[in-house]
Amino acid sequence: MLEAIGWFVLGLVLLALGGDSIVKGASGLAQRIGASPFVAGLILVAFGTSLPELAVNLQAIVRNQPALALGNAVGSNVANFGLTLGAAALVAPLTVRWRALSPLLLVLLLGTALTVVLGLDGSLSRWEGLVLLVVFVAVVAFAAARTRRESPELQDAIAAFAHTSTDLWLNLLRFAIAAVLLYFGSRMVVRSAPTIGEALGMAPLLTGLLPVAIGTALPEVAAAMSAARKGHGDIVVGHVIGSSLFNLLVVIGGMAVIGAPLAFPESFVRFELPAAAAFAVLLYPMLRGDLHISKNEGVALLIAFFAWVAFEILTMQH
C-alpha cells in the first residue's frame, strides 16, 4: 500500500511536469507555424489542462481498465467545478468578462444530458462516440468565432497566456520531454491506483472518480489559485469549462470510438454524470448574473464538492 502510494504520487508529479511542458511546446510550435497568439492561447486555455487526464485515460484503456478511465473523466469534471473553481474563488473573487463562456457552459449541460440518454442502454456505441466528437469540433469552432468578438482587453489576456519562445528545437525538446513524462507518469498512476483503491475498499469506478481525478486536478487547483490572485478570472473559468467539455466529448467519446461498445455502469448514468451536470448548473447563474464569482460562492462550491466526495464514499464502497 505505501509503495503504491509512493508510485502514485511520483506519477502525479511527472504528469504535472509533462502537462506544463507539452502546453508550452504546443503554444510555441503553433505560433511558429503561423497561429496567432490569441488562437494559441484560446486553445490552451480551453483544453491544455486536460492532457494529463487524457494520458491517464489512454493508459487505463490500454491496460483494460475502462471503469477507471470513466471515473477519472467525470470525476475530473466535478473536481473542475467544485474544487478548482471553489478554491480559486476563495483566494480572490473571480470577475468574468468572457461572455462566450455562458453558452459553452450550456453546451456542456446539453452534452452531459445527451451522454446520459445515449448511455441509458448501458453502453456507448462507436457511432454515439463519434457524435460526441463532432459536437466537440463544433464547440471549438463556435468558441473561436464568438471569442473574436470579445473585448480587446480579453483577447490580449488570452494571447498573453500563450506567450512563450517560438524556437523550433526548444519546442520539439519540450514535446519529447512531455511525451516521456506523460507516458511514465500515467503508467505509474494507472498501475498503482487499483492497489490503493482495493486497499480502501473502492471499486475501479470510484478509484477513478476520487483518488485519480482529484490527484490529477491538484496542479490545476494550484494554477487556478495563482491566476485568481493575479485577477485572471476569465482564464480560470475558461480552463474549467473547456477542460470539462474536453473530458466529456473527447475523452468519453474517444473511448467509445476506440473500444466500442463502451460499457456504462448503471450508477455512472444515474448518478455520476448527473452529479457533474449539477455542479455546472451551480455555475450557470453566476455567469448569467453579475459575471462575478464571490468568495461565498467559492465556499458553496467547495462544500458541495466535499459533500459529493462523502456521498460517493458512503454509497459506492464494497
Image (cartoon, rainbow, N blue to C red):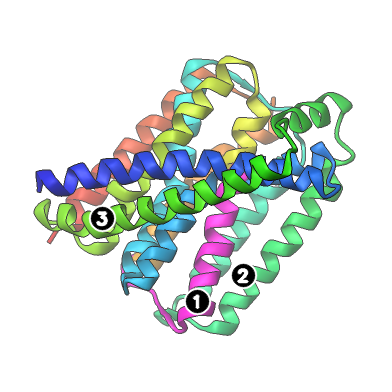
| Residue 52 image position (x, y, % from top left) | 46, 49
State yes or no: residue 253 in magenta.
Answer: yes
Where is the C terminus found, in terms of image quarters? Answer: bottom left
Residue at image coords 59%, 83%: 127
Sooner in the amino-acid sequence: mark 2 or mark 3: 2
Residue bearing mark 3: 207
196 or 110, which is in the foreground?
196
Q: Earlier in the sequence, mark 3 or mark 1?
A: 3
- What residue is pinned by disc 2? 132
Q: Is residue 284 visible?
A: no
Q: Is residue 195 above or below residue 157?
A: below
Circle 1: is it few (<14), some (14-19), or many (20+) Cα within 10 Å?
many
| Main secondary structure of the magenta stretch | helix
Give the crowd class for mark 2: few <14, some 14-19, many >=20 residues within 10 Å. many
Question: Of tags 2 and 1, which is closer to the observer?
Answer: 1
Give the residues drawn in magenta, as a range: 241-267
Q: Amino acid at mark 2?
A: Leu
Q: Amino acid at mark 1?
A: Ala
Task: Identify the secondary structure beneath mark 2.
Answer: helix
Q: Verify CB contact (< 8 Å) between mark 2 and mark 3.
A: no
> Residue 153, how many percent across, how many down?
83, 23
Label disc, if present, on residue 138 of the rendered structure: none
Callout 3 crowding tier (Cα within 10 Å): few <14, some 14–19, many ≥20: many
